[in-house]
Each structure stands twice: as C-alpha cells, then as structure tokens.
Image (spheres, rainbow, N blue to C red):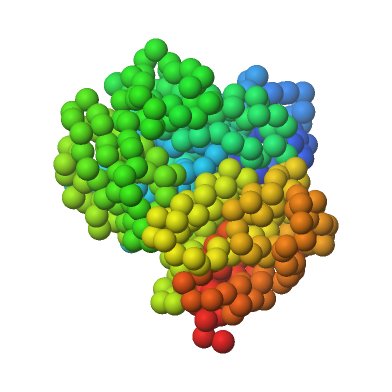
C-alpha cells in the first residue's frame, strides 16, 4: 500500500474520520482512543497509530504504527502532513498564566508595523489581518494547529504569534512546532483542577523553554523571560537559545513606570541600546510588562526600538483586556481577569490610577467564577475584590454544569465582612452597578472579557459584558 498517496486526513477522534484517514488512538483523561479503533476503521481509516497494537482488530490488514507516545507522534506527523509550516514562518510562542493574549496582540501589532505580516493564534480567535478563523481552545489540537499554520502561510503571513497553554504543552500539541522565540510572562494559581500542583503546572510551562527550544530547527532561537516572576527566575532555558530577560529588576529590558492616567501609561525602558521614553495607550504596570515583552520579541527579529515607540502611540488595545466601554460619565472597563493574581493586578492598577489623578470616586467590582473549574480560587478572589474595591457585586460567570448558588457560596467564604451584594443574574448585576454608581466612579466587570457567550448547564448562549454595559447605560 502506498500510504503517502492515499492519506486524506489525520484524525484524533472518530467524528472526523473519512475514507483514507490515519487514526491516532490517544489515551485521554476521559476516554481511551484504543476503544474507538474499530469504529474508525469502519468509517474508512486506512492506518492506525497506537501504543497498544493488541487493541487493533486482528483482521485489519492496513499499516499499524505502535509507538510509546501517541500524542507526540500525532504532533510530528501533523507537521509533516501539512509541510512543516512553522519552519516557513517566524514563529513565536507565548506562555504564562496571565498576559498571553495581550503579548500576542502587541507583538502582532509591532511586527505588522515593521512590515512583517503577522498572524495570531490564541484565546480570542485565529486571525491574519481582517481574516478570522474561530477557535474553541487557546492552543488547538496538533492536527488543527498545523493545518492553521499552513492556512496562515498560504494567506501570505510571514510570522505567527501563538498562545501556548499549559494544557497544550502537557498534551504535546505543539511538539511539531519549530519556534524562533518563546516568551514567559508569569505563573500564578490557575488550572489546578488539571495540573493538581503548582510544581506540575510550572513543569508543563518549562517544556517550551527546554525540550521544544532544543528540538527547534530554527537558528538562532531566543527565550524571553519575566525575571520579576519567581518562576521566571528559576526557568531553565535550552543551551541552544539566547536568554533575554525583562522586568523592573535589573534585566536586558528593564523598565520603570513614570506616570499614568485613564488615557495610558508612560515608562522608561533601559536596554543595551540605550534609554527610551515610551507612552502607551494602555493602563497599568501589568500592561507595561506585556508591552516590553512584545518589544523584546521584535528586537529578537532585529527591529528598531525607535520605530516601535512611534507605532505604539496608536495601538488600539486588546478585546476584553481592560477594554474601555464608551460611557462618558464613568470609567467602565471589561477585563478577562479570572484568576486571583489577574484580578489583584487590575484592581491595584485602578486604585493607583485613581489616586494619581486625585479623584474621590469609588471602585466597583463585578465578578464571578467559572463552574467545573478550580474551586479553591473562589474565596481568594473574594478577598482580593474586598481589599481593593469600595463596592463588590458577585454574580455568575460560566457556571457550566455546577450550581450557580454553590459557586457563589464558595466565593462568599472569602469575605471578612458582609459589605458586598450577590446578584446571580450577570446582566442584572452589571446593570445594578451602572445604575447605582455615581459619575466618575470606576466599574470593573471582570472574568469574561472578550467572551461573547455564557455557558449555563451545557448550553452556550450569546452574552457580552461589553454589550450589556452599553445597554445598561441606555436603560
């Protein structure tokens, strides 16, 4: 059998199997793909990649590839099937708990400004310029990932900036990607429902900077690491990669915030090329970290900082990342902060900005926590909201199949006083904050950011914090 000529697709599940498919039998957390081999063959699969060949029907006469690590093989074969697209693009991987989306958008902007057409693959969507592809995962499965990289290349992209989740690293979805640059933003509590411990969570992130940078066919390669983060300081980097650090501490890209207001932030950046004064239309120290990380990526591709500084002044921001709602009488922001660390950083920034402009306005925080996810962070987020906000409203996020009342009860355990309001319906909670707040007050609607849906039970319905906030001021 001439397998190379007859393969029509690579499949990780039986739903997409067709005549001529190669089926990968992956042992997942919920289901073992070996139990689906017969179904895949009935639908037309012509070859099987598995770790246990005994599970393949005895009467199957096609090729069987038995390997120890099916996930890794699926990534490597996907890269080959689609023509190794990452080798033909400048490929940047961004990992960390917070800031991945912001760094990818900022990097895309800087590279585009410098004349390098750049695609983005991440939480919000996959896009190249105005062309968009929908996605359900921050980092898709290896077949979809390699197919999308080929789409980008075929659409004239010269570079791609992709968010690389800890799940993707643990499940080896990016094993077939050749990275030019890897960026580490930070590591704080998240996804412990999956990784169980912070040590395991860190080890998953670590793979991008050791295993994958070492395997990359690119030369040179660069690792860009936030040196202010405790996990960043202990990050090991492949000897093949050049390490470049950034942060407020002494580093290759060292910054110092000078001043900020509701319009943006001014900071000083010190590099080996000199000192630079930079103004960005983004709020908060955390966004300076994101901006500097993106600038470090552009420098790795030999772009000039002076050119970046001019371009950053017209940056339009990131959907759902401290996105300002156009309401004249109040400062209303929608943000994706859904972890304790992210919520704390955003609220701290709002407190400091309020103080710097000497306003006596109150800070309102509207937030909830997702269902079927790490419940341990719920009271922690309540403690943070209480500490940095004048008014707190807790509400539903994406409860999924978990009881919304139970989620709210878990959140309530973190409050030391009863100075908060509970409104389960998220739309009503947002409208309440808008209607009860005074002019010049600051309202943070946290947790969902760019998401335009809410998941209740197993049903996904349209819901946008941004749209609901605008509607609330009209009602």
* Residue 60 percent location from the top left of the image: 70, 31
Count the labels in the image. Answer: 0
In this view of the protein, which residue sits in the foreground, 327 or 14?
Answer: 327
Q: Which residue is drawn at 34% across and 25% down?
A: 251
For this orientation, the residue located farthest to the top is: 239
- Is residue 105 in view? yes
Determine whether 103 is above or below 452 in the image: above
Q: Relative to residue 277, is residue 457 depicted above or below?
A: below
Residue visible at 46% across and 72% down? 440
Q: Is residue 332 visible?
A: no
Asked where in the image residue 469 lies, by quadrant, the reply is: bottom right
Q: Which residue is drawn at 43% across and 42% down?
A: 162
Nearest to the observer: residue 415 or residue 12 = 415
Q: In which quarter of the image is residue 239?
A: top left
Is 226 situated left or right of 32 in this image? left
Quarter-of-image position of residue 308: top left
Image spot of residue 331 (x, y percent): 46, 68
Left or right side of 98 for 406: right
Q: Is residue 139 above or below residue 243?
A: below
Q: Tell me which residue sits at (33%, 37%) in the image.
A: 256
Q: In which quarter of the image is the C terminus?
A: bottom right
Which residue is farthest bottom? 475
The location of residue 210, given as percent across then percent down, is 48, 19
Q: x, y percentage for residue 341?
A: 58, 43
Q: Nearer the viewer, residue 187 or 130?
A: 187
């Amino acid at each position: 059998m001439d397998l190379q000529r007859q393969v029509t697709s690579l499949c990780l599940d039986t739903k997409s199997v067709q005549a001529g498919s190669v089926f990968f039998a992956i042992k997942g957390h919920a289901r073992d793909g070996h139990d689906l081999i017969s179904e895949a063959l009935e639908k037309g699969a012509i070859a099987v990649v598995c770790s246990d060949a005994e599970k393949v029907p005895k009467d199957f006469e096609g090729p069987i590839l038995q390997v120890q690590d099916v996930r890794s093989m699926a990534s490597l074969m996907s890269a080959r099937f689609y023509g190794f697209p990452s080798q033909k693009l400048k490929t940047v991987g961004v990992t960390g708990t917070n800031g991945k989306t912001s760094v990818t958008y900022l990097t895309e902007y800087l590279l585009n400004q410098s004349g390098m057409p750049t695609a983005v693959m991440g939480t919000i969507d996959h896009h190249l310029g105005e062309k968009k592809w929908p996605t359900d995962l921050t980092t898709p499965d290896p077949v979809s990932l390699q197919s999308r990289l080929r789409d980008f290349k075929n659409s004239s992209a010269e570079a791609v900036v992709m968010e690389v989740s800890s799940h993707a690293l643990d499940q080896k979805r990016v094993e077939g990607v050749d990275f030019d640059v890897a960026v580490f933003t930070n590591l704080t509590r998240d996804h412990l429902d999956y990784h169980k411990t912070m040590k395991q969570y860190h080890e998953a992130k670590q793979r991008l900077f050791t295993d994958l940078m070492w395997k990359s066919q690119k030369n040179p390669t660069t690792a860009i690491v936030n040196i202010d983060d405790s996990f960043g300081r202990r990050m090991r980097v492949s000897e093949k990669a050049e390490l470049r650090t950034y942060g407020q501490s002494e580093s290759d890209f060292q910054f110092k915030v000078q001043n900020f207001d509701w319009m943006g932030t001014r900071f000083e950046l010190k590099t080996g090329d000199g000192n630079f004064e930079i103004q960005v239309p983004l709020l908060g120290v955390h966004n300076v970290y994101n901006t500097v990380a993106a600038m470090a990526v552009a420098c790795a591709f030999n772009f000039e900082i002076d050119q970046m500084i001019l371009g950053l002044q017209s940056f339009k921001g990131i959907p759902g990342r401290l996105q300002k709602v156009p309401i004249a009488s109040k400062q209303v922001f929608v943000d994706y902060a859904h972890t304790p660390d992210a919520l704390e950083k955003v609220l701290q920034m709002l407190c400091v900005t309020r103080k710097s402009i000497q306003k006596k306005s109150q800070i309102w925080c509207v937030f909830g926590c997702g269902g079927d996810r790490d419940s341990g962070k719920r009271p922690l987020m309540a403690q943070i909201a209480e500490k940095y906000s004048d008014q707190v409203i807790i509400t539903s996020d994406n409860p999924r199949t978990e009881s919304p009342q139970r989620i709210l009860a878990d959140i309530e355990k973190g409050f030391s006083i009863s100075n908060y309001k509970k409104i389960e319906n998220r739309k009503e909670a947002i409208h309440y904050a808008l209607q009860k707040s005074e002019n010049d007050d600051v309202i943070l609607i946290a947790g969902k950011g760019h998401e335009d849906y809410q998941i209740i039970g197993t049903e996904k319905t349209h819901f946008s914090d941004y749209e609901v906030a605008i509607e609330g001021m009209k009602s």
